[in-house]
Image (cartoon, grey):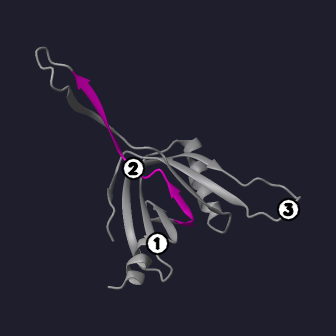
Amino acid sequence: MTVLEETRTAVGVQYRVTVDGADLGAFSTCDGLGVEVVIETREEGGTNGFVHQLPTRVKYPNIKLSRPLGAGSAKVAAWVSSVANGYTRTTCQIVVTAVDGTTIASWSLAGVVPVRWTGPQLQSDGTKVLTEQLEIAHHGFSGGGA
């Protein structure tokens, strides 16, 4: 494999998002995909060489997805507004694809609920790209490979 081929597979061009099988479209950025293990420290009497570090819980930060406003925006708005009528936590897939459409990596998220949708800033004094941002909370993920 050449360096060019290795670089191509490492560069994600778009992030395709589906919620319970419904395609919300492609996003240009995906921030916050991660995990943190919260550690509690305990000191033991007579043991001065170290402090016990005990894992207590796992925290997953919210994921923020953004993209230019487009045809898929109506699907996102419908999903977010459905929370007002009561919601059930759903599953979500985030798939990273290259320019040629091949899958680079994918993650399955559990217990997903929309937290925030931010629409574009509407200004008539310039020619800026209208963008939207979707923030979702989740209970964890699996995957990461192609």
For the N terminus, the quadrant is: bottom left
Q: What element carries label 1?
A: loop
Percent coordinates x, y for residue 64 in the rendering? 53, 52
For the C terminus, the quadrant is: bottom left
Identify the residue position indicated by label 1 in the image: 11
**What range is drawn magenta here?**
24-42
Identify the residue position indicated by label 2 in the image: 34
Q: Between marks 2 and 1, how big is the CA–CA gap?
A: 18 Å
| Callouts 3 and 2 close, C-beta under 8 Å | no
At label 2, which amino acid type do we have?
Gly
Q: In this view, does 36 lie above or below 64?
A: above
**Residue at image coords 47%, 63%:** 18
Q: Nearer the viewer, residue 105 or 135?
A: 105
- For the residue carrying disc 3, how many other residues have a C-alpha within 10 Å: few (<14), some (14-19), or many (20+)? few
Q: What element carries label 2?
A: loop
Percent coordinates x, y for residue 82 in the rendering? 57, 49
Q: Which mark is residue 106?
A: none
